[in-house]
Amino acid sequence: MHVIATAGHVDHGKSALVRALTGIEPDRWDEERRRGLTIDLGYAWTTLPSGEQVAFVDVPGHQRFIGNMLAGVGPTSAVLFVVAADEGWRRQSQEHLAAVDALGISHGLLVVTRSDLADPAPALLDARDRLSATSLGDVESVAVSARTGAGMTELTDALVRLVVRLPPARPGDRVRLWVDRAFSIRGSGTVVTGTLSRGGISIGDELQVGNRRARVRGLESLGQPRDRVLPVARVAVNLRGVAVSDVARGDLLLTPDAWRMTSVLDVRMGGQSSGDLPNHLTLHAGTAAVAVHVRPLGDDTVRLTLSMPLPLVAGDRLILRDAGAQRIIGGALVLDADPPELRRRGAAARRGAELASATGVPELLSEVERRGAMLVADAAALGIPDSSDDAKVLKRGTWLVSGSALHRWADALIACVQQQAAAEPLEPSLTTEAARLAAGVPDRTLLPDVVERAGLELHQGRVWLPGVRAAMGAAERGLQELEARLQQAPFAAPEQPDLAAAGLGPREVAAAVRSGRLLRLSDGVLLAPDAPAKAMRVLAGLAQPFTLSEARQALDTTRRVAVPLLEHLDGRGWTRRVDGTHRVVVR
């Protein structure tokens, strides 16, 4: 299916044209039919001679309903631009063309209607000249009369040629459906409609609606029930789990957790100087209309702060409108949907210079380089193409890391550990968390890579300079004597008087433990680091299972040492309790 929006001045025959093409009345409300003008969005569809199905979004042409018009044109990629032969170009013709140009729509047809009432040639010539100066360029044009049927065959043939040129659908993409209507059907519940331009929806799918999750209960497209709908398509979605009062035009149906909601955008204005913009405007994206604050950055770039977050990505096209003056200011291309904060003096100007060459197509390396690292899921949510073959972007688990960031973090970490070793000889290392924070590493899972890049050592949860351990100073001799004792009697843990006699106070003991020269068990029991392995060799020779008392006697130690030692072995999975009093060695 292809979805095409109408555009043009009020009462220039847009609805009559759609009715003649499809046989369907697009005006849904009694007031619209009574007044003879489209107030809200109307929908109709037909099958072309080529077999292609086309759905039309009939938008209002009256100035008072320009917001509704933008909601209809926003999610589409093609337009049927309508001008009446007997009236020619009018004010809303220009307003609608400005919207089409602002959105960068490049596919369309020019249709001059009511050719039975006036010579269509002047209107055709004038309108083609105006359209050619916009994103539509030199479009094909047709003169028709919906009343007499003149030119309708030629229009149908032109539509066949148009749909062939439309961009391909993206069925495998994540869903982003801008809601243009929400209502309730007795016995079915909440139904929303919209133009599905990316991603596929199936019955049973879970979708995100605001901060809620809803299940797809039913689908309808072109008046027929469907099990699955692929883009591009007009679709009605019956939702379970959300009330009709909780969803309205401008809301979205999204693939859960696949989009990043943003309240700050850096954009490029189309043909507008940033310095000429008002501070406050209305942003139109899809069917949403959101108040924004405008901050100039460069000659044609600005930062927009949204009054409510939207799932926008680089490359999206927006319309900025002065709602008070009822005029379209211009279009905007999203350059960055996750821009850096502007904190320092001159930051805005520097950011403007950075954006001067931005294209709206995010590039993985530059995005990762700017941040140092980013989650794979965040890159996908921002619509950044995966360039996994780029050797300068390293994938580490769930993270993408730039090589330059690894070098930067490594240099910072070396400096921090050197400073720590110089200032605290008894404590010359950093905990992994302290090391991560000091070097600016965003996640602890990345620290081993940084440590390796820095040529440091990661030992017992701490980061050390190579070969450096705690300098015990005057306590070194006492520690060496204690180490020698424990080699002779591995399970004869020293008591407090023994430590004091060796000159080992709490700081010295802690330093010896951190450097791996002593092993601290629960209850303050100190042994040599290889004591657990020696204990296992002894316990493996016992009849299995064995009791605490049997273990204590075999190890030639006290209960004070045996209890925490066995608990330590249990914790490492080397021994296992079989009941309240017995253990076995795990083979």
Image: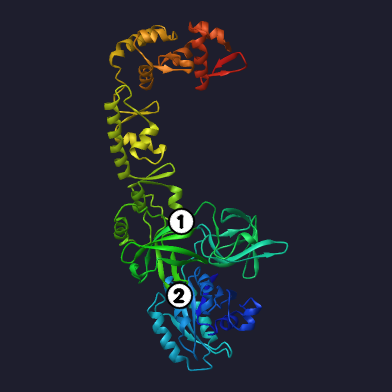
Q: Residue at x 60, y 53 (%)?
A: 213
Q: Residues within 10 Å of mark 2 (few under 14, many from 20)?
A: few
Between residues 7 and 250, which one lies in front from this camera angle? 250
Residue 226 horizontal/vertical position (percent) = 64, 63
Question: Dot 2: what SS?
Answer: loop
**What residue is shown at x 59% (from left), y 53% (from top)?**
212
Badge nearest the viewer, 2 or 1: 2
Q: Position of residue 267 (x, y in %)?
A: 38, 63
Q: Is residue 56 above or below residue 189?
A: below
Task: Give the camera-side residue of 108 and 346.
Answer: 346
Cβ atoms under marks 2 and 1 closer than 8 Å? no
Crowding at dot 1, Cα within 10 Å, few <14 / some 14-19 / many 20+, comes out as some
Whether residue 472 can be seen here: yes
Judging by the rendered image, the residue that carries numbered circle 1 is 262
Q: Count the marks: how many?
A: 2
Amino acid on which the number 1 mark rests in the picture: Thr
Is residue 213 shown above or below 317?
above
Quadrant in the picture for residue 97:
bottom left
Check the image and report above or below for 265 versus 66. above
The residue pinned by badge 2 equals 325
| Horizontal side of residue 202 vs 307, given as left or right | right
Q: At 49% from the left edge and 69% from the top edge, which residue is drawn?
A: 74
Furthest toward the right, the residue is 187
Q: Nearer the viewer, residue 333 or 165?
A: 333
